[in-house]
Amino acid sequence: MNNEYIAQQLKEISESIFEHGSPWSTAQFLSQLMQENTEIIYQCKDGEMIGYILCQRVLDEAELLLIGVLPNYKHQGIATSLLKDMCQRLQQRNVTHLFLEVRLKNKEAIAFYDKHHFKELGIRKNYYKNPSDDAKMMQLEI
């Protein structure tokens, strides 16, 4: 798959999984994919991308930018598999910490991160717009 196709697939999945639509445009996904410090893992079934995890490395740290699985494939361990695979890849690149921000109202995502041993670092007030929400900052030692 070329980067343009991957970016389009990421946008389409994001449209279907995020309550308020994709937080990124296809162009933003493509721009991120072109960065040499970007890490992406995606899973396909029958030639269709069904889930992905997208991270960005900076020295010995990384930020989990987005993770998602199509609704029909949720609760099948795909997100867990993607996260574990990404952590292994990041370890190979000498990354020791994975950070993220998540909407405070996104209880399902927070439960997922808690289950995978992310620790809360704090709250960023009014971090998200449209609709407005606070962000929970979390970290995983890998």
Image: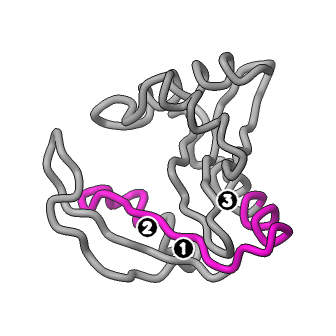
Please tell me the numbered disc located at residue 74. Answer: none
Residue nearer the viewer, 141 or 105: 141
Dot placed on the residue nearer the N-terminal end, 3 or 1:
3
Residue 3 image position (x, y, % from top left): 71, 24
* 7 sits left or right of 134 in the view: right
Q: Which residue is mark 3?
A: 83
Residue nearer the viewer, 50 or 40: 40
Where does the N terminus fall, quadrant-wise? top right
Q: Is 106 drawn above or below residue 88 in the view shown?
A: above
* 13 sits left or right of 43 in the view: left
Residue 142 image position (x, y, % from top left): 70, 79
In the rendered structure, which segment of residues is drawn in magenta? 85-110
Q: Is 119 drawn above or below residue 74 in the view shown?
A: below
Q: Which residue is mark 2?
A: 111
Q: Amino acid at mark 1?
A: Lys
Q: Which residue is mark 1?
A: 115
Q: Nearer the viewer, mark 3 or mark 1?
A: 3
